[in-house]
């Protein structure tokens, strides 16, 4: 004999067609004539709908997104000492060590690369052009790990390859400017190209750390900032607010990488200058 | 084995990535961005609202997903695949701190499940819609008070809209177990769902 419990077990959850066995047919006949069973299925539907309608749906905070994408960047470049399962908080100590190493690398680089000729020297420009041509056309790759390795083999300073959620990495090339080598990392974003330049900062150019300046030249927008002895520039045809947001995102990733207190940055108002 | 299981686990050669298979490889970050909100809120609920724990769980799961990304064969399977990894990462974390016997004791036998189904008392307001002013916070609290196994299932099925079969694959348990857990979760939550309706009726009478 078909009981209420058996009928409900055979037909619930009602997620679509099921094999019409003799028992299932009996269960359906039972439910058709049983008010309590009909109420049971109706209640299940209503409870489910109510849970769906009232369940909390908090948004992921931007800090969580930043940390997550930075962790992915670290995983891709293989810089994680703790492996994939380590919580981000455990990496703060590593970040402090990395900061010290980066500062040491930069000091060593500056000490060994002092200019001996003016940048305006025509012969120097020719040499730079020659070296630029010899360096090849760069690397075409969407793999941030590969790009990071390629740059690490060619530059005297460390360059982090930022990962922007809306942009697609397309490659990287070397830059030689005023006897200083740098990196240009290329992205595609919304049908536009985005270039991220990194090169050593001369002492005359150095401004306040991580103060973003947004400027426009020849129709292009630029977001520029200095940090840890390096000048960073984003260039694109994107609207200025968008470029500013990308610059801030880039800085967030770097500070997360270095384990610095990013709240200090969040409290800073971006310094925007129009030249 | 479902289509997305085949797609995820790669046992069907037709779903292998490559020209003509219909799956244009995309950056992992791009795929993740599409589902990040749902993954975050699910991680938050699995961790009973503890944001730091949810963040660690999510990061752990995402890094595992990155390492296995080449196993994903179909773009359409990405959502279920990411949720499977998140769910199993959560399970692994729980298993590290709980004895297996505690899990087995918590499941209903088939007979006990049928009895529980038969004992369902209809909602007190059968002819009315449940009051819509139910506070989300009350449901959140009730969800967080559920045992982990029940909370995961009701969240995956009722909130995120996965089928029983998909939830069974994610949890690595039979579909019957999912049905039982889903019923028990709803049975516990109904109290929360009914109280605001009763309060609203009392309020109207005053």
Image: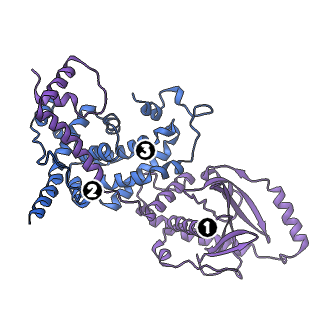
Which residue is tagged 2? B48
Q: Residues within 10 Å of mark 2 (few under 14, many from 20)?
A: some
Q: Secondary structure at mark 2?
A: loop
Image position of B81 (left or right of A188): left
Residue at image location 91% in from the left, 70% down from the top = A123
Residue at image location 36% in from the left, 55% down from the top = B41
Can you tell which quarter of the image residue A199 is in? bottom right
Please identify which colour was used for chain B in the image: blue
Which residue is tagged 1? A243
Image position of B130 (left or right of B56): left
Q: CA distance from mark 3 to mark 2?
A: 20 Å
Q: Is residue A199 above or below residue A133?
A: below
Q: Secondary structure at mark 3?
A: helix
Image position of A25 (left or right of A170): left
Which residue is tagged 3? B82
Can you tell which quarter of the image residue A4 is in? top left
Locate residue B19, reporting x and y percent.
Answer: 63, 33
Please identify which colour was used for chain A in the image: purple
């Amino acid at each position: 004999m078909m009981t209420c419990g058996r009928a409900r077990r055979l037909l619930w959850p009602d997620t679509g067609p099921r094999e019409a066995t003799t028992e299932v047919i009996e269960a359906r006949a039972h439910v058709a004539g049983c008010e309590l069973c009909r109420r049971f299925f109706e209640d299940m539907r209503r409870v489910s709908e109510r849970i769906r309608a009232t369940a909390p749906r908090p948004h992921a905070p931007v800090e969580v997104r930043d940390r997550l994408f930075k962790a992915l960047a670290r995983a891709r470049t293989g810089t994680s000492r703790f492996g994939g399962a380590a919580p981000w908080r455990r990496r703060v100590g590593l970040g402090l060590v990395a900061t010290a190493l980066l500062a040491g690398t930069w000091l060593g680089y500056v000490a060994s690369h002092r200019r001996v000729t003016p940048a305006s020297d025509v012969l120097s420009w020719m040499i730079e052009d020659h070296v630029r041509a010899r360096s090849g056309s760069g690397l075409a790759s969407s793999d941030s790990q590969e790009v990071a390795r390629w740059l690490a083999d060619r530059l005297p300073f460390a360059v982090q390859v930022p990962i922007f959620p809306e942009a697609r990495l397309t490659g990287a090339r070397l830059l030689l400017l005023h006897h200083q080598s740098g990196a240009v990392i290329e992205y595609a974003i919304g049908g536009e190209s985005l270039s991220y330049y990194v090169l050593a900062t001369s002492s005359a150019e150095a401004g306040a750390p991580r103060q973003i300046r947004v400027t426009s030249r020849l129709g292009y927008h630029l977001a520029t900032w200095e940090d840890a002895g390096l000048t960073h520039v984003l260039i694109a045809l994107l609207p200025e607010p968008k470029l500013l947001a990308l610059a801030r995102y880039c800085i967030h990733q770097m500070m997360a990488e270095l384990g610095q207190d990013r709240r200090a940055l969040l409290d800073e108002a971006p310094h925007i200058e129009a030249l | 084995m479902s289509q997305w299981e085949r797609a995820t686990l790669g046992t069907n050669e037709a779903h292998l990535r490559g020209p003509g298979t219909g799956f244009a490889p995309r950056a992992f970050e791009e795929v993740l961005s599409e589902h990040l909100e749902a993954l975050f809120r699910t991680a938050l609920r699995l961790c009973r609202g503890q944001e730091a724990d949810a963040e660690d769980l999510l990061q752990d799961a995402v890094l595992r997903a990155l390492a296995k990304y080449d196993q994903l064969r179909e773009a359409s399977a990405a959502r279920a695949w990411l949720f499977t990894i998140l769910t199993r990462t959560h399970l692994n974390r729980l298993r590290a701190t709980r004895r297996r016997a505690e899990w087995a004791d918590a499941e209903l036998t088939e007979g006990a499940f049928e009895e529980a189904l038969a004992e369902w008392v209809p909602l007190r307001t059968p002819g009315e819609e449940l009051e819509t002013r139910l506070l989300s916070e009350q449901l959140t609290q009730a969800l967080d008070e559920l045992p982990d196994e029940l909370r995961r299932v009701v969240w995956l099925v009722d909130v995120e809209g996965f089928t029983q079969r998909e939830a069974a694959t994610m949890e690595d348990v039979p579909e019957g177990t999912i049905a039982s857990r889903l019923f028990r979760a709803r049975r516990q939550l109904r109290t929360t769902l009914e109280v605001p309706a009763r309060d609203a009726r009392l309020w109207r009478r005053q």
